[in-house]
């Protein structure tokens, strides 16, 4: 399958899928044998990978809470994955019940799960779209979820950009999102780091060839490029464990976390 056409077109239970693998790592049930097999191989290489998944989830939810406490009422969650409680809308609405969320994923399977699991949840709209088509993401967020980009918004891009290859123009896509951010908006990113243990990088890459789970590990300097023109909020761009609490131990799979604000 061409590198620029890796988005799944339907249910494929025989290839690992990022959202389903992540769901498995978090203890969810919405995954297939291929996802569990891939996850188990990663755990053989780095048994603490589940800890990394939970660190990433904690980072996302903490960033959402802090954004809501700062007055942001609109959230665009790109690569939202299969819903697992607590969800983004639950955390945001705990701070402000009027908060709205565009819950976006490129996988039709995730979209189907979201529609089924989020039916009746006020203020959250599942949307089928791909970050590699940022104009469509923006259009559907406006039209279907009611996002008003003249007001502050939080773009949440957690566990997504390391699945977008350089030739798929991830920097251009994020730059397009930054263009529409009103003052006070935030960009929340988690990205796999080049400093991940070499054996894990090699194994995860080999196991995911020709699947949507093929990762691109990037240097911290390259991850910082996604925040161009934004103020990095404390504690800056750090591995997830350090971003949450400097006392937490490091993991073999290193994911960098950061939040930028448009002033």
Image: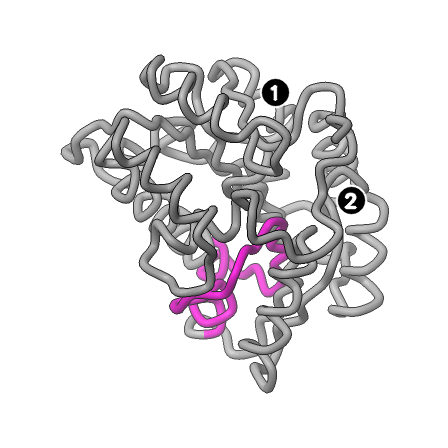
Residues at marks 2 and 1 touching, judged by CB atoms closer than 8 Å: no
* Quadrant hosting residue 105: bottom right
Left or right? Give the position of 247 relative to 131.
Answer: left
Farthest bottom residue in view: 120
Q: Position of residue 233 (x, y in %)?
A: 45, 35
Q: CA distance from mark 2 to mark 1?
A: 17 Å
Q: Residue at x 55, y 46 (%)?
A: 17
For disc 1, the neighbor class at 10 Å (few under 14, some 14 to 19, many from 20) is: few
Q: Which corner quadrant holds the C terminus?
A: top right
Report the coloring of the rendering.
Answer: one colour
Left or right? Give the position of 126 relative to 60.
Answer: right
Q: As rendered, which of 6 and 26 lies closer to the eye? A: 6
Q: Is residue 258 above or below residue 110?
A: above
Question: Is residue 40 magenta-colored?
Answer: no
Q: Position of residue 231 (x, y in %)?
A: 55, 31
Q: Which residue is mark 2?
A: 180
Q: Residue at x 84, y 50 (%)?
A: 136
Q: Secondary structure at mark 1?
A: helix
Q: Is residue 9 above or below residue 97?
A: above
Give the numbered dot on residue 45: none
Q: As rendered, which of 244 and 127 lies closer to the eye? A: 127
Q: Residue at x 49, y 31 (%)?
A: 191
Magenta span of residues: 67-93
Q: Which residue is mark 1?
A: 225
């Amino acid at each position: 399958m061409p590198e620029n056409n890796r988005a799944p077109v339907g249910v494929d239970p025989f290839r690992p899928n990022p959202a389903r693998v992540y769901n498995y790592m978090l203890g969810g049930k919405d995954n297939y044998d291929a996802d569990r097999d891939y996850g188990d191989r990663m755990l053989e290489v780095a048994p603490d990978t589940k800890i990394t998944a939970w660190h990433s989830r904690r980072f996302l939810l903490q960033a959402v809470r802090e954004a809501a406490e700062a007055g942001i009422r609109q959230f665009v969650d790109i690569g939202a994955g299969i819903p697992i409680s607590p969800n983004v809308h639950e955390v945001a609405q705990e701070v402000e019940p009027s908060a709205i969320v565009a819950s976006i994923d490129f996988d039709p399977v995730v979209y189907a799960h979201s529609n089924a699991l989020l039916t009746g949840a006020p203020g959250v709209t599942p949307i089928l779209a791909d970050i590699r088509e940022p104009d469509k993401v923006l259009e559907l967020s406006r039209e279907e979820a009611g996002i008003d980009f003249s007001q502050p918004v939080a773009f949440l891009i957690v566990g997504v950009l390391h699945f977008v290859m350089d030739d798929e123009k991830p920097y251009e896509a994020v730059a397009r999102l930054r263009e529409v951010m009103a003052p006070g908006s935030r960009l929340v990113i988690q990205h796999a780091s080049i400093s991940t243990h070499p054996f894990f990088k090699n194994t995860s890459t080999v196991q995911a060839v020709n699947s949507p789970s093929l990762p691109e590990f990037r240097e911290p300097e390259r991850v910082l490029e996604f925040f161009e023109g934004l103020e990095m909020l404390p504690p800056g761009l750090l591995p997830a464990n350090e971003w949450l609490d400097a006392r937490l131990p490091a993991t073999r799979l290193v994911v960098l976390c950061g939040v930028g604000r448009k002033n």
